[in-house]
Amino acid sequence: MDKPDKITGVFSTQEVHKVGTGTTTRKSIHKAFWYCIELDSGDNAGKMDVQPLNVNYIPSGPKRIIEKENFLNEFSPEPEFYMSTVFPRMREVTKKVARGERHRNNGELFSAEMEFNNALKVDEENVRANFGLGLTYMQRGENAKAENILNRIVKLDAAFDQEHKHLFNEFGIQLRKNKMFGDAIAYYTRALELSSQDENLYYNIARACLENKDPATAVDYLIKGLELNPRLEESAKFLLWMISKNLVPGDKKPEAVKALKKAQEAAKAPAPAAPGQAQPTPPASDAQSP
């Protein structure tokens, strides 16, 4: 038997407010529009992902998860509005971003900047457009402008979703290439707030800390990453390299050696069996050997 189609589209809610007092009291109805998707996997399967439309009728801003029963009681479908207004605008933003990415990949950086900015005029929280514009500025060596975009990106939880992993990694690599080490640390630290169990992020912060001339903090993050996953070869090699170069402070050497011994033991042991249920994978490391 075929599964029923999941609910997707634009819906509205209404709030009634009383304005004035006494004989001058009147009702004011506020109508809000939302882009809604029924989730079909993970812990929230069967629930509704709800995101408001901005003033340009583009899905933008914080999402929330609500029970499907509550959704069906409170939200009204707006299929004509979706097809006539919202969908065409969403498609146009997607086209602008795609053109911007194509220009950036071709080295046409000023054209890329124009397309990304045009997309952001309509949807200032568009993740791909923000990443694209930030990368464009860094490729042009305009680090001050790139830093402004970075400050916007770190406020967007969606920027660190798995679907944006490639852009996430590229942005982090470019921050380091442009020697924006403090910004790279802030960037990865923000990602760590949203995904504290990603051992790769500890590696990335450690590398940025070392390049920012803070080896002690780099060691701390490498040890934390190896505590999460002793099999992370990049972190073990990095820590071993730091010891060989006398970059590990004396008071941290015992802990560092202990972490390396655990890593060596884990490398020799059989790999653990895969868990019964797959878990979502956070953005991967952009790590390379030191």
Image (cartoon, rainbow, N blue to C red):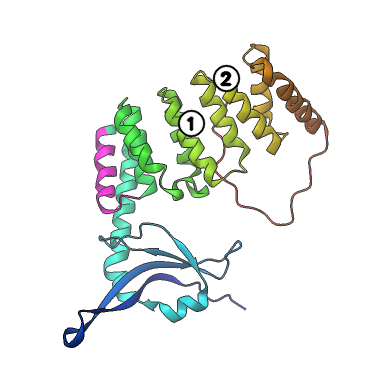
Task: Evaluate whether residue 105 shows in this view.
Answer: no
Frontmost residue, 99 versus 23: 23
Please tell me whether residue 122 belongs to the stretch shown in magenta. yes
Frontmost residue, 177 versus 80: 177
Q: Give the residue at x 58% y 25%.
A: 218
Q: Mark 1 and mark 2: span between their CA atoms?
A: 13 Å
- Rendered location of residue 53, percent (x, y): 33, 63
Callout 2 environment at 10 Å: few (<14), some (14 to 19), or many (20+)? some
Q: Residue furthest right?
A: 269
* Magenta portion: prevailing SS class: helix
The residue that mark 2 highlights is 215
- Residue 194, numbered circle: none
Of the 4 image quadrants, the one containing the C terminus is top right
Of the 4 image quadrants, the one containing the N terminus is bottom right
Location of residue 14 by image quarter: bottom left
Frontmost residue, 261 versus 7: 261
Location of residue 61 by image quarter: bottom left
Residue 54 drawn above or below residue 161:
below
Tell me the amino acid under the disc marked 1: Ile
The residue that mark 1 highlights is 185
Q: Which residues are magenta?
A: 110-125
- Rendered location of residue 247, percent (x, y): 62, 14
Frontmost residue, 5 versus 262: 262
Give the side of residue 192 with respect to residue 236, left or right: left
Residue 256 drawn above or below residue 60:
above
